[in-house]
């Protein structure tokens, strides 16, 4: 590395031009007095003292002002590099925390130009899923994100997957065992749609997914205001028209659910097998005040369109009907307005 590049790299570490010149002079002399460094750098002796103190604070040099004249010598480069590395490592947790928070709060749209990048972005979003995802994807591309889907399901994520443009000669459910919570198929092509945790989404037109030589563009975005609308479109326009081919077994109870829809699904499946389900939920009234309370009871019914036969009145309705000490009540997820209560935390238990 030449002197110019070395000087530039040192400035990247926060050293001023004068500090760089002084430090390099000290390095070359190994040990020197302020007068010798001043002569080598062309700055005043007083300024050398000031710069040397700053360099000592950063761990670049040692200053012995108990002798006359004051001696200044460079610390071994490996010690300097080790100290700088430790400083950067100490910053990493705080930087990572801020980066994650900024990523969650990101409000932007990203235009994606290639099919390969679309699939890559979908895989990244699925890997980040924490509670639930919906995905409409062509059959031929399902294998490209199958590993990420399996890992999401293993994490307890509710995965509703619509496989479109499916083979007309049938669908092998072994291809989706463990890949999703519920799978539906449709022989027609649909836009590629992904939503994750009510926060992230990807939309790609049919032409972009089907052909590599197209000028169509996809959009990847992080918009909490838009993703629920996309979920509503998915559940209202595409999900009901497709054929149900796979439903995973409900989770073992007791279980806490990060996705309210997932709790509704598992309660539905258990009730259909005459397995009683208890519920404990942190709720607030959907209308009439912010009073928090813990609701406990027995689930006696559900309203849902996640699995056949659907029992809801409109596509995004997902409700638990619970018998409590205060009577029968309905509980919905975040943003509920028709149910009696809105739940933020839900735990289901097995009842005898």
Image (tube, grey):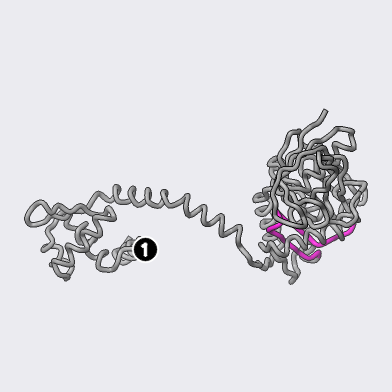
* x and y, in percent, of residue 182 in the image: 82, 45
- The residue that appears at 25% across and 60% down in the rendered structure is 54
163 up-or-down from 215: above or below:
above
Q: Which residue does the numbered mark 1 point to in the structure image?
A: 12
* x and y, in percent, of residue 89 in the image: 42, 49
Label 1: which secondary element: helix
Identify the image quadrant of residue 218.
bottom right
Name the one closer to the observer, 13 or 208: 13
271 up-or-down from 136: above or below:
above
Identify the image quadrant of residue 4.
bottom left
* x and y, in percent, of residue 348 in the image: 76, 38
* x and y, in percent, of residue 335 in the image: 75, 57
Q: Quadrant of the C terminus?
A: top right
Is residue 203 covered in magenta? Answer: yes
77 up-or-down from 257: above or below:
below
- The residue that appears at 86% across and 55% down in the rendered structure is 239
The single residue placed furthest to the left in the displayed view is 68
301 with respect to 113 (left or right)? right
Identify the image quadrant of residue 313.
bottom right
| Stretch in magenta | 188-206
31 with respect to 241 (left or right)? left
Name the one closer to the observer, 190 or 104: 104
Q: How many marks?
A: 1
- The residue that appears at 87% across and 37% down in the rendered structure is 271
- The residue that appears at 81% across and 60% down in the rendered structure is 232
Is residue 300 covered in magenta? Answer: no
The single residue placed furthest to the top in the displayed view is 352
Q: Quadrant of the N terminus?
A: bottom left
**Mark 1 Cα shell of 10 Å, populated few (<14), some (14-19), many (≥20):** few
Name the one closer to the observer, 71 or 352: 352
């Amino acid at each position: 590395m030449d002197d110019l590049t070395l000087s530039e790299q040192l400035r990247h570490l926060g050293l001023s031009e004068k500090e760089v010149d002084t430090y390099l002079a000290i390095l070359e002399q190994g040990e020197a007095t302020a007068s010798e460094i001043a002569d080598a750098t062309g700055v005043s002796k007083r300024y050398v003292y000031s710069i040397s103190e700053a360099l000592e604070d950063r761990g670049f040099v040692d200053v012995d002002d108990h002798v006359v004249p004051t001696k200044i010598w460079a610390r071994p480069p490996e010690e300097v590099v080790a100290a700088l590395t430790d400083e950067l490592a100490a910053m990493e947790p705080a930087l990572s925390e801020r980066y994650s928070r900024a990523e969650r709060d990101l409000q932007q749209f990203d235009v994606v130009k290639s099919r390969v990048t679309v699939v890559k972005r979908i895989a990244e979003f699925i890997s980040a899923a924490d509670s639930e995802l919906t995905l409409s994807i062509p059959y031929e591309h399902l294998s490209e994100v199958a590993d990420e889907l399996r890992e999401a399901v293993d994490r307890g994520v509710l995965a509703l997957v619509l496989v479109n443009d499916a083979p007309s000669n049938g669908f092998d459910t072994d291809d989706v065992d463990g890949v999703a919570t519920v799978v539906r198929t449709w022989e027609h092509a649909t836009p590629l749609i992904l939503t994750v945790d009510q926060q992230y989404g990807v939309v790609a037109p049919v032409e972009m997914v089907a052909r590599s030589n197209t000028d169509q563009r996809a959009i990847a975005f992080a918009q909490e205001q838009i993703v629920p609308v996309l979920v509503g479109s998915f559940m209202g326009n595409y999900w009901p028209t497709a054929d149900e081919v796979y439903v995973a077994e409900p989770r073992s109870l007791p279980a806490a659910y990060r996705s309210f829809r997932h709790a509704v699904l598992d309660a539905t499946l258990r009730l259909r097998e005459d397995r009683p389900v208890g519920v404990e939920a942190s709720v607030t009234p959907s209308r009439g005040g912010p009073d928090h309370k813990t609701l406990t009871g027995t689930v006696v019914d559900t309203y849902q369109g996640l699995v056949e036969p659907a029992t809801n009145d409109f596509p995004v309705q997902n409700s638990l009907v619970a018998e409590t000490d205060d009577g029968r009540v309905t509980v919905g997820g975040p943003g509920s307005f028709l149910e009696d209560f809105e739940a933020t935390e839900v735990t289901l238990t097995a009842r005898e």
